[in-house]
Amino acid sequence: MPAPRFVEQLNAQIGNELSAHNQYLACAIYYDALTMPRMAAFFYDQALEERSHAMMMVQYLLDTDAEVTIPAVAAPTSLFADLVAPVELALAQERTVTDQINGLLRIAREESDFASEQFMQWFIKEQVEEVATMSDLLAVVRRNHDDIEEYVAREHGAEGEDATAPRQAGASG
């Protein structure tokens, strides 16, 4: 069984991931309302990815006979000043999540919880990718609004699933 301190913080992180899901959903809806289908699809996909991260964490807790507690989450920001604001918010959010994931790894190490430390390794790699993706998208959005839809289609059009990702609770297969 994972260390109690790790379980407590992983349950909190499940809430953080679900909050990120809701925030990306709000970003997607913003772009959908502006008839920017590729940006909307990008953020709808990001929302699903955040939900899948939460469900990976749920599955880990279930697999290790630890208690799962789904915390409440605050409403997302849904009003944005311009096309850049949702991406700026997304990058800030990914940087915050990176700090949270690093904190979970730190707790696992401090508690000598080697299985939980191993579980967190995939999330460390994932956060490097997420911050890079949002940083690149922000650079494009700031540079030229006309290129946004083309950039998203070219760079994020057909990404496959990561075979090394932890299992998700409730996922078939």
Image (cartoon, grey):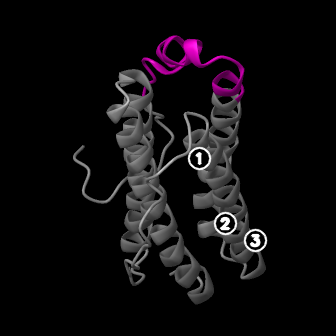
Given residues 136 and 120, the one toward you in this image is 136
Residue 62 rendering spot, x and y as whole percentages: 36, 72
Given residues 7 and 71, the one toward you in this image is 71
Residue 28 rendering spot, x and y as whole percentages: 39, 39
Q: Which residue is mark 2?
A: 100
- 151 drawn magenta: yes
Q: Residue at x 50, y 81 (%)?
A: 1
As helix, strand or loop, the secondary structure at mark 3 comes to helix
Callout 1 crowding tier (Cα within 10 Å): few <14, some 14–19, many ≥20:
many
Q: CA distance from mark 1 to mark 2?
A: 15 Å
Q: Which residue is mark 3?
A: 106
Q: In the visual, does 80 lie left or right of 67?
A: right
Give the residues in magenta. Answer: 139-160
As helix, strand or loop, the secondary structure at mark 2 comes to helix
The type of residue carrying mark 1 is: Ala
Of circles 3 and 1, which is in front?
A: 1
Residue 88 rendering spot, x and y as whole percentages: 65, 43
Q: Which residue is mark 1?
A: 90
